[in-house]
Structure formats: C-alpha cells, structure tokens
Image: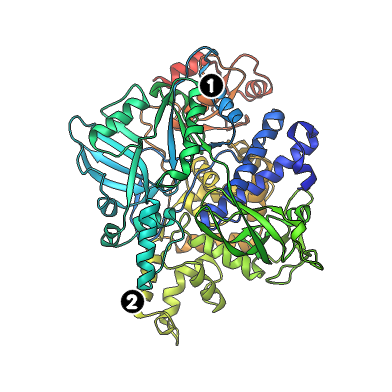
Amino acid sequence: MSRSLRDRAAKDLSDSEAAKELKALAQEIVEHDEAYHRNDAPTISDAEYDALRARNAAIEQRFPKLVRADSPSRKVGAATAGGFKKVKHGVAMLSLDNLFSDEDVRDFDARIRRFLKLNETEPVELTAEPKIDGLSFSARYDHGRLTVAATRGDGAEGEDITANIRTIKGLPDFLMGDAPKTIEIRGEVYMTKSDFLAMNEAYAKTGSKIFANPRNAAAGSLRQLDPKITAERPLKLFAYASGLVEGMDWATHWDFLKQLKAWGFPVNPDAKLCKTLDQTLAAYRQLETRRAALDYDIDGIVYKVNRIDWQKRLGFVSRAPRWAAAHKFPAQQAETVVEKIDIQVGRTGALTPVAFLTPVNVGGVIVSRATLHNQDEIERKDIREGDTVVIQRAGDVIPQVVEVKTEKRKRGAAKFVFPNHCPVCGSKAHREEDEAVLRCTGGLFCKAQAVERLHHFASRDAFDIEGMGEKNVEAFFTDGLIKTPADLFTLEARDKKSLTPLSAKEGWGALSAKNLFEAINNRRTISLERFIYALGIRLIGQAKARLLAQHYGSFKEWRKAMVAAAKGNDEVRNQLQGIESFGDSVTDELVAFFGEAQNMAAVDDLFAQMDKVEDFVQADVSGSKIAGLVVVFTGNLIAITRNEAKAKALSLGAKVAGSVSKNTDLVVAGPGAGSKLKEAEALGVKVIDEDEFLKLIAG
C-alpha cells in the first residue's frame, strides 16, 4: 500500500483508491491478528494496530458500498497454554472495540441509539470502569459454590486455573445469601506496582528471574502449574462482569456490581454510573489525571450500557459486544537510538523490518526493539541505523517508531536499503501491486516459513502441543525429524527405531521425551475448527476457521468442498463467498492452498494420523426452527435492525449467508429488497417478511 495514500484522509480517496486500501488493510490486519494470537509475539504496538483498525473503519464509513465481506471487524483471541486442562465458557469471553477520542465516544452513543431505534432525548446510561491491565478470568459458581475457573483463552475455551485462583484473597469460595443456580463471574487478576517492585527486588537478590512489568508478572503467576507458587505471589483481582447466568437476573449492570460487592467480590472503587454523555467524558478525564497515581496499571476506561435488557438486544458482533467499548488512554513515549535494523521472515513469507534499540524505559517497561512495519514505513520516515528516534507504546507489546530526530543524525548515516531477496533462503522477494509487504517466494523451501508454519501448527490456539515451542520446532526441523505436521505424529515410532533416540540427545532425558510423546498423542483428537486453523492457510484465522467448520460440519464435507473449489467448481466457490464475512481474498487463499498437490498431501497425511477430527457441534438450539438453515437477509427491517436479526439467527443455529444460491433455505425480505429477492424468487427459495421471521424465531 502506498504510504502517501495511507496518509490521506478517507474523504479524499477515490472509489478505486478506497477499494485498494481496504483490501490491503484486510490482509495486513489479519496477519497482525495471527502474530498476536498465534505466537504471543506481535510485531506492532497496540497503538499502531488500533490505528490500522481505525483507518479501516473510517474508509468503510466513508464508502459503505465498498465494505468487504472479509472486513477485519470480527475477531477475538488469546492463546491458551499447554499443561492446563481446557474449560469451555458458558458464554464466550470477547474482546472490546476501542475508542480514542471524544468524537469516537459520541459515535458509540449514536450507534447504540440507531441500533435500538432511540430518539436523541432518550437517556442512555453508561457505566464507566477502569480498564485493568492484567489477565482476564471467569469463575463459575454452581448453587453458590466455586466449581471451576478459567482464563479467557480463545474466547470460547480457556485454561483451568481453579486451584491457582483459589489462592487469591478476594475470590470467595461461596456466595453468601441468595445465589443463582449457575453464574460465571468475570474479572481481572493483576499485581500492584508496589508489590511488583518489591517482588522483583527480592528475586534480584537471590538471582532469580525478574519480570518485565506487573501485567506479565500477574499472567505468569496465575499460569503456574504448581498452585503453591501462585500462592506466594502478591496477586489481587477485580470482578466486573458476568457470563452464563441461570436463576437470577438484574435490571442494570450497576445493580449487578452492587450484588458482586454483597457477595464479597472486590469491585473497582473508581467505577461510575454516568447518566449523560458529558458525565461519561468527565469520568474519563478524571481517571486520566489520576492514572499515574494509581497503584495498578490501567490503559483506559470501559463503557457499558447500563440497562441489561438493552445489552441483550444489542448483542454481539463476532469479536466484541455492541453494548461495551474501551476508551483508550494516549500512548506513552520515550527517546532512544536505533542500533540496528533487521529483517524477519514470517510464516506467510512477509519480510518485516524490526529496529533493535538502545534499551529505554517507556512507562515502566524496558523496551529494546520496535517494529518498522514495512518498506514504505522506513522510506516515509527515513529511518536509519544510528538515528535517535521517539518510540511509543500503548499496551504490553512491541512499540513503534513515531518520529526521527533528524537534527541529531550522525554525519554520513546511510539510508537503509530494503533487501529484494529473502535473508533466510535467498529466494526473490516479491511485492504484489496492492500489498504493503514484500514476501519471500521460497515457500516451504524457506526454512523461516517452514519452521513458522510448524510452530503455528503446534501453537496454543491450534493443536496446542506442550513441549513444541519455537526452539524445539526449529531444532527438530534442522535435524530433519519433522518437515510436515504429520511428522509430529510419527516421531515416537521413528524415534524407537533410531540409533540416536531423542532421550539420548542433549537437553532431552527419558522423562522429557516421554512427556513430549504423550503431549503429541493427546492431540490425536481435535475439533474441526482447530484442525482448519492449524493448517496456517493465509487469511484463515480462528474466526474464519470456525465459520468454515460451522458451515461444512465435518472434515469429509469440508475437504470435498475445498477440492471442488480448487478444481474450478463455481457453485462451491459461490457457496464459500456466500459465508458471512468471506469474500474474494479469503476464497482465493483457500483455492490457492488446495490447488497445490503438496498441501493436499499434507492435509491427508495429517488426517490419517488423527484418531478423530470432531464434527462441529452447534450450541444447544433444541426447539429452534431455523437451526441448520442457510438464511439471507435483504431489504430494510422495521422492528429490529439487520445486524440484530443476523445475530439472533446465528444464536439459534442458522447459517447466515451474504448472497442467495440454490443452497439458501430462507430469505427474509424487508421493504426495499432488490436483487437478492429476485434471485430467491428465480431459484424458488422460500421468502418471508420480518413479521413471519419474528414469529418463526419466537417458537
């Protein structure tokens, strides 16, 4: 993507320029999502990532007809760790959309009003709660007794941390007084700044490893396999939300916070109930001025619609609730020196420049590297080795360079020359016309790509194989022990016949080898969505892998469809493009992947090693009359909005498509329906109006 184009305001773009940038943004954001959620190793800062999403949203708002089916507006995910049992959440734990300005907050308020069809005078109360920089948890209570607790994980499934979280003062084992049959209490585990400093000082004296920041310390402490270690760490928590609730309800979120206090949960004392938008913005200003004085880290303030009935109506998009958002604080900055610029090669072959910096303290965190994003970014800012630069971070990730202090540049400092060949394998680096990055053309021949793909396959959100971290994956690849995913599952059998078994290698003992083989064998049963995601197909993140699993149901049906699409079957291709949020780019990547014989062989070899690839299991939708139906919405809806109708259909087990085909079961048509209605009538697809749809889903 041309940097000069990226710098222009959305309103100044032509239709063709906007379409070109939206395509580039879709690809770029998906790659950053995968880097963050797959490897816990993001290559850009929170602020830079948020800026990409904000840019995408601004263009979509200016050019609504150009909004892509694969728009990067629907995703959530954080990795789960090996060594813990998995726990499925009763209600998904999603992320929050971000707000960065007063205008964004006003737009948030306006979106709520539009969705609920409220007039401008109708009051919309919001709660405003500090956004704690810690580790999210969900604790389930059955009949008032704590039964299980888990991390957020990938939003649907987290790590079982029950034994660990019981050691934290403030989390009750029993709910005193009236308690619902079942309730999931959500909150954040954190460590205060003073406790963090004291703990690090004590560790430094004994030569133990010290933590980088309170957030890392809290997350690492809660994820200890030995609860005794967790008990020794000074952890605290705040409760602020619920998940699944059976047998009790509240009229407002503020009432729920009061109930949390009554049950004995710590609730943030700085939470406020705001009756007007002015009060909401005032709460943000007050907390921003007090941020540095707080003894715990916060990176913003979370707004939630107070009325629970409105929350239920607003519902969710795939990655976030519509009724809540996070108003982020400005990024923190510091000045340092670029000692070296290095090029790193990712799983998809992307060449990403990274600046290695003279270590500097930025908001309490020692930073030693920053992303330079791509070739255009380096050229636009003219970043050179030896330059003094201003860097900023807005969250616990790698920061970005925001400014070069050219007045401090040393005489003779040479411009950085971006390589035109892969620094790992030497293959030519190619840049597509509408892409912002150069990519290595070496494919699996390139060690960096092969190792990254295998690391992705074994990573937490994919097959989650404990012991197959980046270091071991690279070592096994270098030694020729694994080249494809299926090789992992034949490793034990081959090792038994080896003259130099794994247990005889440096760093491996009999027990560690045994544990590795057990971890691999424990993953011979896998869900279809994880299987698909683990293949590392470009643009197929967790959300799209789940949509594919939901649409096709089984591995057999999915594989059959993918082969047909790769062979040019237009009907199957149209079905793919009809899946909600899919479009040309995603479909092209799937077709390209399955069009390669070696990829098909890798998929089939892997499947042959599985005991079972589990069919997609839809949430309990017993009694739903639209479960399993392919539904298309067209025209205007009156009683509810189109988004609300889609969300309801999905929750009842339907498959929502964006286009009509002979596989469509039902078209819901409102006033103003156009070509989709005509296509439905031509194909003989059943068409109903909004009233009939509402009666249908009401049972």
Question: Helix, strand, or loop for circle 1?
Answer: helix
Classify residue 582 by image quadrant. top right
Closer to the camera, 132 or 647? 132
Q: Position of residue 627 (x, y in %)?
A: 44, 31
Identity of the residue furthest to the bottom in this view: 499
Disc 2 and disc 1 in contact, CB within 8 angstroms: no
Count neighbours of disc 2 (C-alpha within 10 A) and say few if under 14, some if 14 to 19, many if 20 or more. few
* Colouring convention used in this rendered image of the protein: rainbow
Question: The C terminus lies in which quarter of the figure?
Answer: top left
Q: Earlier in the sequence, mark 2 or mark 1?
A: 1
Q: Position of residue 393 (x, y in %)?
A: 57, 51
| Residue indicated by mark 1 | 115
- For marks 2 and 1, give the CA distance: 58 Å
Count neighbours of disc 1 (C-alpha within 10 A) and say few if under 14, some if 14 to 19, many if 20 or more. some
| Residue indicated by mark 2 | 511
- One can see residue 625 in this view: no
Q: Nearer the viewer, mark 2 or mark 1?
A: 1
Identity of the residue furthest to the left in this view: 177
47 over 477 or under it: above or below: above
Q: Position of residue 600 (x, y in %)?
A: 59, 59
Closer to the camera, 319 or 673? 319
Amino acid residing under circle 2: Leu
Left or right: where does residue 9 sit relative to residue 519?
right
